[in-house]
Amino acid sequence: MLAPNFSAADYLRALEAHLPRGRVWPRDSDASQTKVLGTLTPCFARLNARANNLLVDAFPASTYELLPEWEATLGLPDPCAGAAPTTQQRVAQVVSRLTATGGQSIAYFKAVAAALGYPITITQFVPSRFGKAFGTLFGGTAWAFAWQVDAPTFTINSLQFGGSFGTPFATWGNNVLQCEIERLSPAHTTVLFSYS
C-alpha cells in the first residue's frame, strides 16, 4: 500500500466538505472563506509530504534526515569512520551496527566486511606441530591466536544515489574496515591485515 499523497487542492476540498451548509458558507473559488482556507492547505500538503518522507527515513538503510539520531543511539560516529565520513559510509556503519549479531567465525567477519562494502578473505594460522608440511612457516604457540584479513590494497567506494551534497564521487582506503574488524575481534586474538 502506497503512502497517501494529498495535494493542497485535496485538503481544500476536505475542509470545505466539513463546513456547515447554508448561504453563509459558500464554496465558490472566489469567496473570501475559500481564499482563507486556501492559505492553510499548502501547509497541510507540506506536512503530508514530510510524513511520507518520515516513513522512508525511519529505516536505517534508507535514512538521511534521521541519520544523526540513529548515530546517537548507536554511539556513532566513532573513530572508525575517519575524520569526515561520507553519508553512504555513515549509513553503512549504522546498518552494520544494528544487524551485527556477534560471532567469531570466518563467515561472520566476512559478512561484517561485506556490509561495510569490503570484499575480504580470512587466513587462519596454526602453531608448529609434528607432521606439519615441510616448507611451511615455523611459528610458536602464539600463532594459534592469530588470523589475517586479506583485502585489496585500496577498496574503492563509489557514490550511490542518495548521497549528500558535497560527497566525493569515490573514496579509497581500508581504514574503516581495519578499525571495525579490530573493534569486533575477540580480545585474545591478534588480527593481521594483508593488502594485495
Image (cartoon, helix red, strand yellow):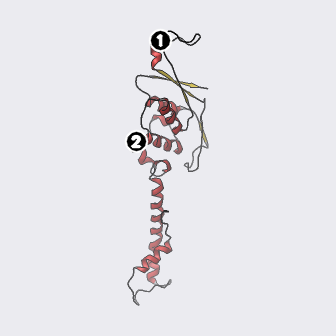
- Residue 82 in picture, x, y percent from top left: 50, 36
Label number found at residue 165: none
- Is residue 3 among the parts visible in the rendering? yes
Q: Residues within 10 Å of mark 2 (few under 14, many from 20)?
A: some
**Front residue of this view, candidates 120 and 13:** 120
Instruction: Kindly identify the residue that appears in the image at 49 percent across and 66 percent down.
Output: 5
Which residue in the rendered view is the most extreme toward the front? 131
In the depicted view, which residue is nearer to us: 146 or 60? 146
Residue 43, horizontal then vertical, whole percent: 45, 68
Q: Residues within 10 Å of mark 1 (few under 14, many from 20)?
A: few
Q: Position of residue 140 (x, y in %)?
A: 47, 11
- Location of residue 108 in the rendering, given as x and y in whole percent from the top left corner: 47, 33
Position of 164 relative to 153 (above/below)? below
Q: Which residue lies furthest to the bottom in this view?
A: 23
Q: What residue appears at the point 39 percent right and 81 percent down from the top-left corner?
A: 19
Cα separation, mark 2 vs mark 1, equals 39 Å
Residue 74 bears which disc, if any? 2
- Residue 140 shows which numbered tag? 1
Q: Which residue is drawn at 55% across and 38% down?
A: 117
Mark 2: amino acid:
Leu
